[in-house]
Image: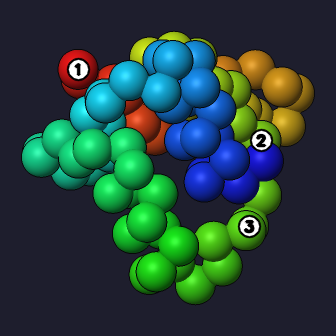
Amino acid sequence: MSIIQALEKMAELNNYEEILVKIKDDDEPTPIDLEIDDIRKFAEDPDQTFDLMVTEYTIRELDENGKEKLGEPLYTVVK
């Protein structure tokens, strides 16, 4: 799934409430809808797919065996 699809799934899991997400290497939380818009505008390939696991609170990458990669999640819900 693409990062956009993962963020949209996270929004769905949060009942489309206004939530803030934090990127793993960014200090400032961003509204999820603005993050999706930024990816559409600035990503080289916004439809690039990754092996991702989406929960209500995080988006994490999966390794080649389908297990969560160790380390920080790609995105975390902060509100």
Q: Is residue 22 visible?
A: no
Residue at horizontal 68%, vertical 47%?
5
Residue denoted by label 1: 79
Distance from label 3 to label 2 (Cα)?
11 Å
- Residue 75 vertical placement versus 44 (above, below): above
**Dot 1 crowding, Cα within 10 Å, few <14, some 14–19, many 20+:** few
Give the residue at the far left of this rendering: 28
Give the residue at the far right of this rendering: 65
Residue denoted by label 2: 51
Give the mark nearer the N terminus: 2 vs 1.
2
| Nearer to us: label 2 or label 1 | 1
User: Mark 2 falls on what kind of element?
Assistant: loop
Residue type pointed to by label 1: Lys
Q: Are marks 3 and 2 in contact (CB under 8 Å)?
A: no
User: Mark 1 falls on what kind of element?
Assistant: loop
Taking the image as shown, residue 33 lies to the left or right of residue 12, namely left
Residue at horizontal 54%, vertical 41%?
7
Q: Position of residue 22 (x, y in %)?
A: 27, 39
Residue denoted by label 3: 48
Numbered mark located on residue 58 in the image = none
- Residue 20 vertical placement versus 79 (above, below): below
Q: Position of residue 52 (x, y in %)?
A: 70, 36
| Nearer to us: label 3 or label 1 | 1
Distance from label 3 to label 1 (Cα)?
27 Å
Give the mark nearer the N terminus: 3 vs 1.
3
User: Mark 3 falls on what kind of element?
Assistant: loop
- Is the C terminus in the top left, top right, bottom left or bottom right quadrant? top left
